[in-house]
């Protein structure tokens, strides 16, 4: 058993007398005890609102909340003033889609493989222009140049796809988009907990991710906005906490990022998120990346060897993947979701089954659902072997 397992109380759970094998971190990660403790500490020792209290408990809450912003900024090489806390990554995309003041004829270019959260806001507020995907659901990245036109207002893509597990050539895309004078937003939901990220090196304009996929509580998201880009971003939600002055005739918003954080935020969630980032910092993102890519390589190799398995992104070399592997396995009269359920009920192996919020990807790849296994720092080779053995039995 890998030495990190002990940090996660959830992983001690049993189902019908069997220890669980958690291979569903792409959906959400379990939380280490230090995160649970940080949330409890907020309730037992602080419990006050942020940016309002004049008493010591309010000061303690605000300091802990703002420390989480510093930790999020440090994780991705940003300045704390470039970090907007949202509810999740989805809200970050919606904030940018509405903040950029897009019109129905404005075009947003992104791969057909994107998660609904980085797809639907662009169809609601603008016009999507898709980069095609191949038969393994990997984007034809080189199509970007042809897709950008005079109506393009934004380019966006997942750093790592939640379905094919492939690391996208973000820096190349940033260069192409910027050469055309177009800003670019990166969906780091699936990459931020597996790879070191430096937004200054990536040179992207916006980047989003969720706390719950990086060992923190749910209900907290991060939107990175490059400092100069705040000027082009209209207000999103309005209300308490985001104004410096509010009179009958006018109001004056606070400076960024606070003017995008109306209302009482998820204080305990952000504090827990800060603890999760400290936990990861102590391990080191380089170490996590090496582990993720080694497990990713094993997953593709072993799952590809199953009879008639169709593994997405299998042709992509291991150094361009993380520990996330999606496949379709033909089993008579069973959907991929049925297979996922059976793995849980018979073997206590937890994976995802279905469409993973990527209907267009599945439609284009002619797949009626898929099975997704995603591993993380607390998984090891034995977990993958267990999954492969269970699937081999089944087929
Ligand atoms: C690639 C990707 N983008 C965006 C999201 C949306 O994240 P959230 O539901 O936390 O907003 C997910 C979640 O599954 C994802 O995998």
Image (spheres, helix red, strand yellow):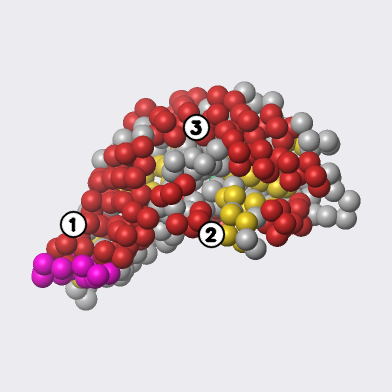
Q: Single out the mark in the foreground, 1 or 3.
A: 3
Say whether residue 22 is left or right of residue 242: right
- Near mark 2 (Cα within 10 A), the count class, few <14, some 14-19 or many ≥20, is some
Q: Residue at x 18, y 57 (%)?
A: 63
Whether residue 145 can be seen here:
no
Query: Whole-Å distance between the Cαs marked 2 and 3?
Result: 24 Å
Q: Residue at x 33, y 54 (%)?
A: 34
Of callouts 2 and 3, the N-terminal one = 2
Q: Position of residue 334 (x, y in %)?
A: 83, 55
Looking at the rendered structure, the secondary structure element under dot 2 is loop
Nearer to me, 235 or 189 = 189
Q: Residue at x 31, y 35 (%)?
A: 77
- Near mark 1 (Cα within 10 A), the count class, few <14, some 14-19 or many ≥20, is some
Q: Name the residue under label 3.
A: 291
Query: Whole-Å distance between the Cαs marked 2 and 1?
Result: 34 Å
Q: Mark 2 points at which residue?
A: 13
Say whether residue 254 is left or right of residue 344: left
In the image, residue 258 sits, relative to residue 25, either above or below, namely below
Q: Does the magenta stretch include residue 192?
A: no
Q: In this view, which residue lies farthest toward the right?
A: 332
Q: Position of residue 1 (x, y in %)?
A: 52, 41
In the rendered view of the protein, which quadrant contains the C terminus?
top right
The part of the chain drawn in magenta is: 43-57
Q: Do the residues labelled 1 and 3 touch (CB within 8 Å)?
A: no
Q: Mark 1 points at which residue?
A: 63
Q: Does the magenta stretch include residue 45?
A: yes
Say whether residue 227 is left or right of residue 26: left
């Amino acid at each position: 058993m890998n030495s990190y397992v002990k940090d996660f109380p959830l992983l001690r759970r049993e189902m019908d007398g069997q220890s669980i094998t958690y291979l569903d971190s792409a959906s959400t990660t379990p939380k280490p005890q230090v995160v649970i403790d940080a949330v409890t500490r907020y309730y037992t020792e602080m419990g006050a609102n942020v940016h309002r209290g004049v008493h010591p408990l309010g000061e303690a809450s605000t300091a802990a909340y703002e420390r989480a912003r510093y930790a999020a900024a440090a994780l991705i090489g940003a300045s704390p003033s470039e970090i907007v806390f949202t509810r999740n990554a989805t809200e970050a995309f919606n904030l940018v889609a509405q903040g950029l003041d897009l019109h129905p004829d404005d075009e947003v270019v992104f791969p057909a493989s994107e998660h609904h959260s980085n797809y639907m806001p662009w169809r609601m507020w603008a016009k999507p222009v898709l980069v095609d995907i191949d038969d393994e659901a990997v984007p034809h990245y080189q199509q970007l140049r042809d897709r950008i036109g005079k109506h393009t207002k934004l380019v966006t893509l997942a750093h790592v796809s939640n379905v094919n597990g492939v690391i996208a050539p973000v820096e190349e895309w940033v260069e192409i988009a910027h050469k055309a004078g177009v800003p670019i937003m990166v969906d780091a939901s699936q990459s931020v907990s597996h790879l070191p990220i430096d937004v200054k090196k990536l040179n992207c304009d916006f980047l989003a991710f969720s706390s719950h996929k990086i060992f923190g509580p749910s209900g907290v998201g991060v939107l990175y906005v490059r400092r100069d880009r705040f000027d082009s971003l209209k207000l999103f939600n309005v209300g308490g906490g985001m104004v410096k002055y509010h009179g009958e005739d006018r109001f004056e918003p606070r400076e960024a990022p606070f003017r995008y954080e109306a209302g009482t935020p998820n204080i305990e969630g952000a504090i827990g998120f800060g603890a999760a980032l400290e936990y990861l910092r102590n391990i080191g993102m380089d170490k996590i990346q090496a582990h993720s890519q080694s497990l990713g390589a094993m997953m593709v190799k072993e799952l590809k060897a199953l009879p008639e398995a169709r593994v997405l992104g299998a042709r992509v070399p291991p150094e361009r993947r993380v520990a996330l592997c999606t496949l379709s396995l033909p089993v008579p009269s069973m959907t991929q979701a049925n297979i996922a359920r059976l793995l849980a009920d018979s073997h206590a192996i937890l994976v995802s089954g279905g469409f993973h919020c990527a209907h267009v990807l599945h439609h284009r790849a002619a797949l009626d659902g898929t099975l997704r296994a995603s591993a993380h720092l607390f998984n090891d080779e034995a977990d993958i072997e267990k999954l492969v053995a269970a699937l081999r039995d089944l087929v």
